[in-house]
């Protein structure tokens, strides 16, 4: 696949609806059409997007069951939006997407932005952090206890985060971080479990700059959500902490343009775009 570095590259590869549809079809069915119901491999083409299975007569489209389902926007617009988000990572905004794609309605641009962002991060929570990971357990007054925070870093930049109220920091590490990763920590001695679980103990550090940054952002988020009131319900606290991590990761995760399109094909249609997404 050709690298898409400039607008000219994009227009050359995906400047028409036909080009986008052809590429989307190859992503959806890389080995040729397969009926989603009976897995038969032959169909009648009813129109440019709709297929009818020759075996069970089930009808489907290239976009059915994906982020693109039921869209009224041209595929060129969606592809342009995906390219904009993949090219700008945390700098991407709804206004920027609106200008890039020419979508007139802010509400429509907002929905496209949210759907693509969700597709980009929907599986993050199921994948453990890896590589070099800072681990801290700062006390958080609003929840009246310490919060475990882990930050995956690469080239001194934050790549992904996770956090939990779990009191056992060792168990938090085991559940959240891939074995073989290097753990940087302070104020917590997890040597026994780290060696037992094949982690690498990083050099001792007196400061965990990334953990401290995430903790400050988390406290601000919780205070804003609860009007500075203390949280007494642990389940609510855990839910809000997960929401914070998901939103933070959505802003910083970097994804290749083609990888993002693949995710948009794999993710089921998104109907709930409330704040807990």
Image (tube, rainbow, N blue to C red):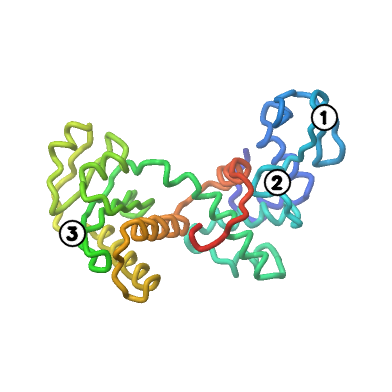
Measuring from the top left, give residue 152's x and y in whole percent: 33, 49
**Number of numbered markers:** 3
Measuring from the top left, give residue 135's x and y in whole percent: 24, 50
Q: Which is more N-terminal, label 1 or label 3?
A: 1
Residue at 68% x, 26% y is 31
Measuring from the top left, give residue 217's x and y in whole percent: 33, 66
- Is 66 placed above or below 273 here? above
Give whichever of 192, 168 is nearer the camera.
168
Residue linked to disc 1? 57
Residue at 58% x, 66% y is 94
Q: Residues within 10 Å of mark 2 (few under 14, many from 20)?
A: some
Measuring from the top left, give residue 1's x and y in whole percent: 62, 38
Which one is in front in this view, the residue at disc 3 or the one at disc 1? 1
Q: Which is more N-terminal, label 2 or label 1?
A: 2
Query: Residue 71 occupies which quadrant of the picture?
Result: bottom right
CA gap between label 1 and label 2 equals: 34 Å
Q: Is 54 on the left or on the right of 232, as rendered?
A: right
Q: Residues within 10 Å of mark 3 (few under 14, many from 20)?
A: some
Give whichever of 190, 17 is nearer the camera.
190
Q: Which mark is residue 107?
A: none
Give whichever of 189, 254 is nearer the camera.
189
Residue at 45% x, 59% y is 247
- Is 37 placed above or below 225 here? above
Q: Secondary structure at mark 2?
A: helix
CA gap between label 2 and label 3 equals: 47 Å
CA gap between label 3 and label 1 equals: 63 Å
- Is 191 placed above or below 87 here? above
Residue linked to disc 2? 13
Q: Is 188 on the left or on the right of 216, as rendered?
A: left
Q: Secondary structure at mark 3?
A: loop
Residue linked to disc 3? 207
């Amino acid at each position: 696949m050709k690298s898409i570095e400039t607008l000219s590259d994009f227009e050359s590869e995906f400047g028409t609806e036909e080009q986008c549809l052809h590429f989307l079809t190859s992503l959806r069915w890389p080995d040729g059409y397969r009926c989603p119901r009976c897995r038969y491999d032959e169909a009648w083409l009813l129109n440019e997007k709709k297929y009818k299975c020759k075996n069970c007569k089930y009808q489907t489209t290239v976009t059915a069951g994906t982020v693109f389902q039921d869209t009224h926007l041209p595929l060129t617009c969606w592809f342009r939006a995906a390219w904009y988000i993949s090219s700008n990572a945390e700098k991407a905004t709804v206004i920027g997407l609106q200008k890039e794609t020419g979508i007139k309605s802010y509400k429509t641009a907002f929905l496209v932005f949210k759907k693509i962002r969700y597709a980009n991060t929907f599986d993050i929570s199921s994948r453990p952090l890896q590589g070099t990971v800072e681990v801290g357990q700062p006390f958080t007054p609003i929840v009246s206890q310490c919060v475990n925070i882990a930050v995956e870093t690469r080239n001194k930049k934050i790549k992904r985060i996770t956090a939990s109220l779990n009191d056992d920091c060792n168990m938090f590490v085991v559940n959240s971080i891939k074995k073989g990763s290097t753990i940087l920590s302070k104020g917590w001695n997890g040597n026994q479990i780290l060696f037992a679980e094949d982690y690498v103990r990083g050099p001792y550090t007196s400061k965990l700059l990334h953990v401290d940054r995430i903790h400050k952002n988390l406290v601000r988020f919780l205070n804003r959500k609860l009007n500075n009131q203390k949280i007494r319900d642990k389940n609510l606290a855990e839910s809000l902490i997960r929401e914070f991590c998901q939103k933070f990761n959505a802003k910083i995760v970097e994804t290749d343009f083609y990888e993002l399109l693949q995710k948009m094909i794999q993710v089921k249609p998104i109907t709930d775009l409330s704040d807990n997404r």
